[in-house]
Image (tube, grey):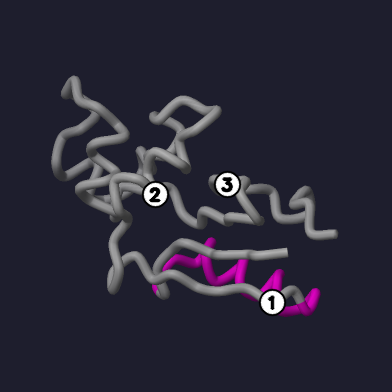
Amino acid sequence: MNVIVYGTKKCPETRKAERYLSERRVPYQFRDLNASPLTENEAKNMAAGRSPAELLDTGSKRYISKGYAFMEFDPLEAVASDSSLLATPVIRIDRRYFVRPILEELPLE
């Protein structure tokens, strides 16, 4: 099982996900979006099978300060160009992506 956690070190939800995985001894890789932003292909893969708007953190300071709530825009393009708009954590297990998942419901076995 290949697990990758996408998020930032300052995000409390990301830290919670990392702690959850560590407590269950699930090996994972951490991808700090501040140090290494998403590529366009990664954003597309995350959006596969869901509305791209589900990737957005509509409560983030960046989303609010840029006025995205009052604009028409492509959510996928916005997340690809600015990773701080992504609802974190995003957990990839093998080829499946989970955006802000309920940790207890992750398929870790």
Percent coordinates x, y for residue 10 in the rendering: 40, 72
Q: Is residue 61 left or right of residue 22?
A: left
Residue type of the residue flagged with mark 1? Pro
Q: CA distance from mark 2 to mark 3?
A: 10 Å
Which residue is at a point 46% across and 25% down the rendered structure image?
A: 51
Q: Earlier in the sequence, mark 2 or mark 1?
A: 1
Mark 2 or 3: the one toward you: 2
Residue at 44%, 63% (x, y): give it. 7
Residue highlighted by disc 1: 27
Q: Quadrant of residue 20?
A: bottom right
Determine contact: label 2, label 3, CB under 8 Å. Answer: no
Of the 4 image quadrants, the one containing the C terminus is bottom right
How many angstroms separate mark 1 from mark 3 (CA)? 16 Å
Are there few (<14), some (14-19), or many (20+) residues within 10 Å of tag 3?
A: some
Image position of 21 with respect to 74: above or below:
below
Q: Secondary structure at mark 3?
A: strand
What residue sits right under mark 3 in the picture? 97
Left or right placement of residue 90 versus residue 56 in this view = right
Q: Position of residue 50 (x, y in %)?
A: 52, 28
- How far apart in space, not on screen, are marks 2 and 1 (Cα)? 21 Å
Secondary structure mostly seen in magenta is helix
Closer-to-camera residue (40/57): 40
Q: Name the quadrant of the N terminus.
A: bottom right
Q: Report the front residue among 16 and 90.
A: 90
**Does the magenta segment cover residue 23?**
yes
Which is nearer the eye, 21 or 37? Answer: 37
Relative to residue 99, is residue 49 depicted above or below? above
Query: Which range is magenta?
Result: 10-25
